Every structure is written in C-alpha cells, then in structure tokens.
Amino acid sequence: MSDNYDLKAAAGNIVSAPDLPYAPPAPVSYRPKIGLIGCGGITEHHLKAYRAAGWEVAAFFDTHAPSAVKRRDEFYPHAAVCGNVEEMMALPDIEVLDIATHPGARISLIEQAIRAGKHVLSQKPFVTDLAEGRRLVSLADAAGVKLAVNQNGRWAPYFSYMRHAIRAGLIGETGSVNISIHWDHTWTQGTAFENIHHLVLYDFAIHWFDAVCSFFPSAAAQSVHATIARFPGQPIKPPLLASALVTYPQGIATLGFNGCGRFGPQETCTVAGTKGTLRASGGVCAIPAVELITGDGAARAELSGSWFPDGFRGAMGELLRAIEEDREPENSAAGNLRSLALCFGAMKSADEGRTVIL
C-alpha cells in the first residue's frame, strides 16, 4: 500500500502455531523430600501443584501450629509437623525447603536454610532490599546450594509460551511490550493487604514486571517512570490505579493497571519484535491462547493448563530440574534481582514523581 492513513491491516495467511515447551518443567528422576515453612493461604496452591506432580512434602512448620497441622492433614497426612524451625533444618532427609512466609521473616529463614545445606524456593518478593538479596545469593553460591524464587507467573501458560517463542527467535529482537490489566482487587478490603500502600505496583505487579524482564532477555531495564492514583469511589485505602513506562537500550515496555475494574475484567499483552508479534488477551491470569504473527502469516496457539496451579508447579519443578542437572534455575534468586530492581524503582518513581534510573 502506498499510503495507510486509515491503518488498514494487511491480509495474511493462517499458519500452524509452533509447538513450544511451555508446560511446567519437572525433574526426570530426582525426587527429594520437601519441607514447607509457612502454611498460609497461598500454600494451598503450592501443595495442590506438588501433590499433582507426585512430589513429597515430608515436613511442615508454621509459627501458628494449627496452620501447619491443617495443611499437613489436607495434603500429606503422613508428613511430620515440626515444633520449631531448628527441628525442620535438622531433618537430614529434607533436601529442599519451600519458604512461604511474609518477607520480614524470610531473610533469616533463607540464611538458616542455606547454612543447613538445603536448596530453597523463596516466596516472592524474594527480599525487600537488593543488598540483602545479593548477600543471600553469594551465601548460596558459597554453600553450593540452589536458591530460586517462586515467580510462578513465568509458568502461566500464556507467559510461558510467549517467553519460549522469544527464546526461539520467532519474533526476532524484542522492541516493545504493552500490558494492560483491568480487574477487581477490592476483595482485599479488611485484610492485611489493605495496609500495603503499593498494593498494585508491589504485591500484584511484581509478576508482570518479572514477565517484562523475561521478554527482554538480553538487556536490563535502564529506567522506569511510574504513577499511581485512586479510582473514583474506590472502597479501600491503597491506590488501585497504576502505570509504568520502562525503557530498555532498544525498546520500551508500558504497563497499565486498574484494580477497581469491577465490570469486564480483562488482561492483554502484546510483545512486538523485529520479525513478528505475540499477542494474548482474555481473562485476568487466565488467557487461553497466544497469537503469533510473522511474515509467514498468523498462528493461534490454543493452550492447556492454567496459572493456578501450573505456575506453582513450574516454579518448584524448575528448581528441582536445576538441582538434578546442576545448573542455575531459570527463576534463580540472582536473576530475580533484576525484576525486583524494576519493581522497587517503580515504587520509588511513583512516590517521588520522577523517572528513576535503575
């Protein structure tokens, strides 16, 4: 077309979607006994995933003992319930610990686990201070144990398919990422979550910041400019509107969040590269398909599985596979520091009303 002022889309062929290994990873034969520290609400999804995968959780601990007993009885009735953390750390047959406490208690627990020679899957956010994160990474390296982070969104089927398509070079070099999420997060009213000022940018958006980092695999973000605002009449304290503009050496990412979207919830994600585009749209955390558009035509990959529980199965499965193969897990704590730097930079930018250099 000599001109395209009305932005008409060129007709394209319909082609078959490439078969990509987006399913949650799993070890081939490594079957260690796992210990769970912290037995709060989210661990229901951890344990559903582990039980479905055939992995054994052999010991439970929570400072509120009835929570540990409850989770044990629900999922692994023959497992032990430890009376304290030291008892858990001393169990010789526990090789891997899933530490699912709140951030404040987690640093000392991770350090104890590393010194006890245990591999660790840390709940997200890994740390609240990057220097502490770097220290724990160095400690794990020196001890010869693997330290990974439960960024389970990486194995949501649509994020995983997009990441593998980028890794396979199907869209060339990533130039832009655009994410928009419209959902109702007011269910947090009256819970501890309502006390988190950056409920959207921190507790929620950390998964999407991590996804953006995985979509730009060869470069770190340079800067971020973020904003927050209150939605008209929103019933909870934390601002439920947020946006972020992230710059890369050759590219940008934009993220928009409306956590007070009570009507028509939707998530969309578009990743454009030098050779093609990936596009996904649907329910929040539940997009069923990914489109791949290249010079060869348009393909639509219908995906199986779901974020809950496949994301949790993927996070632990990748750690177990990495231990088995003696390599760094894709969700390593060292790599996660890049995602955390972006998340923390966004919060700082929103608080100070300026662009933050990362």
Image (cartoon, rainbow, N blue to C red):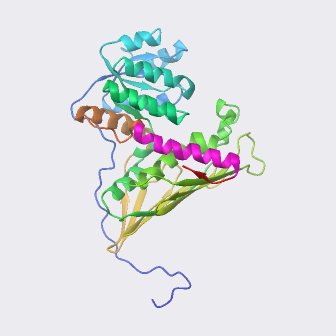
The front one of 84 and 356 is 356
Q: Which residue is at a point 28% across and 24% down the rendered structure image? A: 32
Magenta residues (range): 334-353
Q: Quadrant of the N terminus?
A: bottom left
Secondary structure mainly formed by the magenta segment: helix
Residue at x 51% of width, y 36% of height: 130
Taking the magenta stretch, the answer to whether it contains residue 7 is: no
Coordinates of residue 144 in the picture (x, y in percent): 30, 27
The location of residue 30, given as percent across then percent down, is 24, 29
- The answer to whether residue 338 is magenta is yes
Q: Nearer the viewer, residue 61 or 175?
A: 175
For the question of whether residue 240 can be seen, the reply is no
Marker count (numbered): 0
Query: In the rendered view, does 256 fall on the left or right side of 331?
Result: right
Farthest residue, direction right: 233
Instruction: Write the residue at 39% across / 14% down.
Output: 89
Residue 82 image point, x, y percent: 43, 11
The residue sitting at the bottom extreme is 2
Left or right: 282, with 75 as reference point = right
Residue 180 coordinates in the image, percent (x, y)? 57, 57
Quadrant in the rendering for residue 225: bottom right
Depicted 189 relative to depicted 181: above or below: above
- Is 196 situated above or below 305? above
Q: Is residue 155 left or right of residue 269?
A: left
Q: Quadrant of residue 47?
A: top left
**Residue 323 in view:** yes
Q: Nearer the viewer, residue 40 or 229?
A: 229
